[in-house]
Image (spheres, helix red, strand yellow):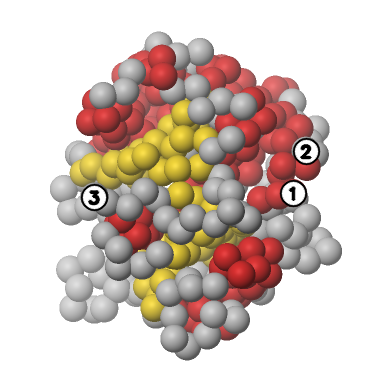
Amino acid sequence: MPNEVFIYDAIRVPTGKKGGYYKNILSEDLVAFLIDALLERNGNFAKGITEVVLGNSIGTLGNMSRYAGLKSYLGKDLRASTVDLQCGGTYQSLRFAKSLISSGEATKVIAGGMESNSLMPTRVYNKNDPRYINNSHVKVANFAPISQYDLLESAEKLATKYGVGKSEMTEWALQSHLKAVKYSRLPIYRQYVIPFSAKAIIDQTIKENLTIAMLERLSKNSLIDRTNTADYHDGAGILLLSNAQDDQVRPLCKILDIEIIGIDPDQSPEGCVIAAEKLLYKNGIGLAEIDFFEINESFACKPIAFAKHFDLPLGNINTLGGNLSMGHPYAASGVINLMNLISTLKLNKKKYGLVSAGIAGGFGAAVLIENVF
């Protein structure tokens, strides 16, 4: 029988803007800082970590997880690997870590993600590559050879399909910031978000005095624009997974299941809906059994479309804010979403939560967790 897998700890650094908090800081250094903090705060329970699996999509090249591990107190004996599922990096790393523990290959594994838009290397396709164009820089990966639309166009398709209007997305963006402001002032925020420096105390991306009028002034004629789309961010976060039982340490939650499904790349934003649907069906769980939902906010239309598809009250989704306010550091975004969901369940003393994301390249990811009281 497979081992049950629990998340015992979850920490991240405050998200930074591109060119902000971490403009000169390697994301590997952020991870090493978090690993050492995790080791210190978990004492003897943290002994026996044998593996680190982290997501990254625009890295500084090489096996960044190994680099981070070598800079931490875990040292050279650690097995470390870096995976790329774009903004689904955390979910894939979580899936791999859970599999290692479920199978008995490991008992304690660190999963998570890291990203630095500030230090993304300048890249140019080789002249022999058919995608090469006049030595121009590659700013966005070619996610899929069959895709007809970029992510903005795909998000617009999603909004149109579910009748999500511009004003709805503007209001959602505003509420994301207002909720995040309140959350950042709670003790539970400090439990999971660890200041990296005297300046990096809370997410640099949270706007305390944002108003509808300010968003409308920045708005463009297009349905999807910068007011309802996550910007470019830096960040890192890690999760400690284990099946070990320890009377001195209680887990945060149990991971019930993880679903990652391939879909049409032009439907990427809708992956949050498709993956959640499959996960619930596979586990025989009805929507009424899920207390709270956390939907990745790379676009404001995603959580709103999710609510409309499943006929859910908006108040049950992203109750503490989301990526529009806290940042969307691609592969590390899933850690933000999971932490928010765990916090929501703890604060409300509820049992079940589901986090879901639509992922560039044509994937949907969903994770079902059970709060441990």
> Which residue is labeled 1 in the image?
190
Point 24% across, 50% down: residue: 1
Q: Is residue 91 above or below residue 175?
A: below
Instruction: Determine the CA span between mark 3 and mark 1.
Output: 37 Å
Q: Label 2 neighbourhood size at 10 Å, few (<14), some (14-19), many (20+)? A: few
Q: Amino acid at mark 3?
A: Met
Q: Is residue 214 above or below residue 129?
A: above
Q: How many marks?
A: 3
Point 58% across, 31% down: residue: 345
Mark 3 against mark 1, which lies toward the viewer? 3
Which is more N-terminal, label 1 or label 3?
3
Say whether residue 301 is visible.
no
Residue 303 location (% of width, % of height): 46, 27
Q: Label 1 neighbourhood size at 10 Å, few (<14), some (14-19), many (20+)? A: some
> Which residue is labeled 3 in the image?
1
Point 59% across, 74% down: residue: 32
> Which residue is labeled 2 in the image?
186
Q: Amino acid at mark 2?
A: Leu
Q: Label 3 neighbourhood size at 10 Å, few (<14), some (14-19), many (20+)? A: few
SS of the residue at dot 2? Answer: loop
Residue 245 location (% of width, % of height): 49, 55
SS of the residue at dot 1? Answer: helix
Instruction: Determine the CA span between mark 2 and mark 1.
Output: 7 Å
Q: Quadrant of the C terminus?
A: top right
Residue 217 location (% of width, % of height): 68, 28
Identify the disc placed on residue 86.
none
- Is the C-beta separation of discs 2 and 1 under 8 Å? yes
Q: Amino acid at mark 1?
A: Arg
